[in-house]
Image: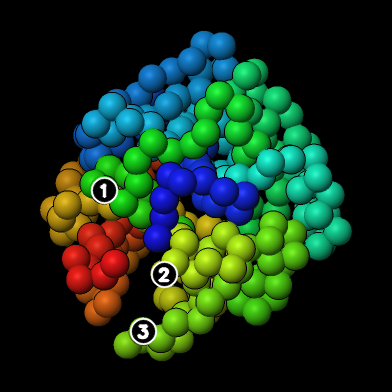
């Protein structure tokens, strides 16, 4: 499961790129109860807190530079060395490794199918301070064109491991740091198998935990979000929904099955 006991290959951060950060702050503040703290030192970058704990980040990105989206970051102890491994595995560098003051070092990449992801080499900022609770990240999912090829890429480039599991809906591939399946924090899925994803380019989608998926979807609608997948229950997983925020960034909501470890 997703954890804050970070190792290389752990999922350590998620952040939002949006054309209107003030509007995004208002939306997520109402939807999740997040508190937004902007840093003038880092170009107005926003840290979102839930119950006083860091759970995500956000920044204003001009629409001509990038579409609104949530991005994910994997931990590395050496961003430059990982960048070389990613390129050798046929990944694409979108932003070269750079220092973020004393906080850490970051870089952005695209996998061979085009899904974007980031690297974080921690300095003073280690990553999430809370996960798997309402208002915090619970899971991430890669929607791609070829699951075995994606598993091979992330294994070669970042040392991530994958494990097949059986759900009532069929087989599913989970992803985790190294060889420890108990550390799984995400999954790999063929976008063609999901009507909400089939026509979209490959991408990573974050799932945020909420106390009540149906109530959160209703609130999101009131706030101007659109619903891409209505709330549904998946045995052995929990209750899920997918939405697009009023600025155009997509995310998923989940209330985990309490019987699941």
Name the residue carrying label 3: 167
Q: Which residue is found at the position 50% from the left and 41% from the top?
A: 13
Q: Is residue 60 left or right of residue 166?
A: right
Q: Which residue is found at the position 46% from the left and 46% from the top?
A: 5
Q: Secondary structure at mark 3?
A: strand
The quadrant in which the C terminus is found is bottom left
Q: Which residue is found at the position 53% from the left and 58% from the top?
A: 204
Q: Is residue 72 left or right of residue 228?
A: right
Q: CA distance from mark 1 to mark 3?
A: 23 Å
- The front one of 162 and 108 is 162
Q: Residues within 10 Å of mark 2 (few under 14, many from 20)?
A: few
Q: Position of residue 152 (x, y in %)?
A: 71, 72
Q: Position of residue 220 (x, y in %)?
A: 23, 47
Q: Position of residue 30 (x, y in %)?
A: 22, 34
Name the residue carrying label 1: 133
Q: CA distance from mark 2 to mark 1?
A: 25 Å
Q: Is residue 33 visible?
A: yes
């Amino acid at each position: 499961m997703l954890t804050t006991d970070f190792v290389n290959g752990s999922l350590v951060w998620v952040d939002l790129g949006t054309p209107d950060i003030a509007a995004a702050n208002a939306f997520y503040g109402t939807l999740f109860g997040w508190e937004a703290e902007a840093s003038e030192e880092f170009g107005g970058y926003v840290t979102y807190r839930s119950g006083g704990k860091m759970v995500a980040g956000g920044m204003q990105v001009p629409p001509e530079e990038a579409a609104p989206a949530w991005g994910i970051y994997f931990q590395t102890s050496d961003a430059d060395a990982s960048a070389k491994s990613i390129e050798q595995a046929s990944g694409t560098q979108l932003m070269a490794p750079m220092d973020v003051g004393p906080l850490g070092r970051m870089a952005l990449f695209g996998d061979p199918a085009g899904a974007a992801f980031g690297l974080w080499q921690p300095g003073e900022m280690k990553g999430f301070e809370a996960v798997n609770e309402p208002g915090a990240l619970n899971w991430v999912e890669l929607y791609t064109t070829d699951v075995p090829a994606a598993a091979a890429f992330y294994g070669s480039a970042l040392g991530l491991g994958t494990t097949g599991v059986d759900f009532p809906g069929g087989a599913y591939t989970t992803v985790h740091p190294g060889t420890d399946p108990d550390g799984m924090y995400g999954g790999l899925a063929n976008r063609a198998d999901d009507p909400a994803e089939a026509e979209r380019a490959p991408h990573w989608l974050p799932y945020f935990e909420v106390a009540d998926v149906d109530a959160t979807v209703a609130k999101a609608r009131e706030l101007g979000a659109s619903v891409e997948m209505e709330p549904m229950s998946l045995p052995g997983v929990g209750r899920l929904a997918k939405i697009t925020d009023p600025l155009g960034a997509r995310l998923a909501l989940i209330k985990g099955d309490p019987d699941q470890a």
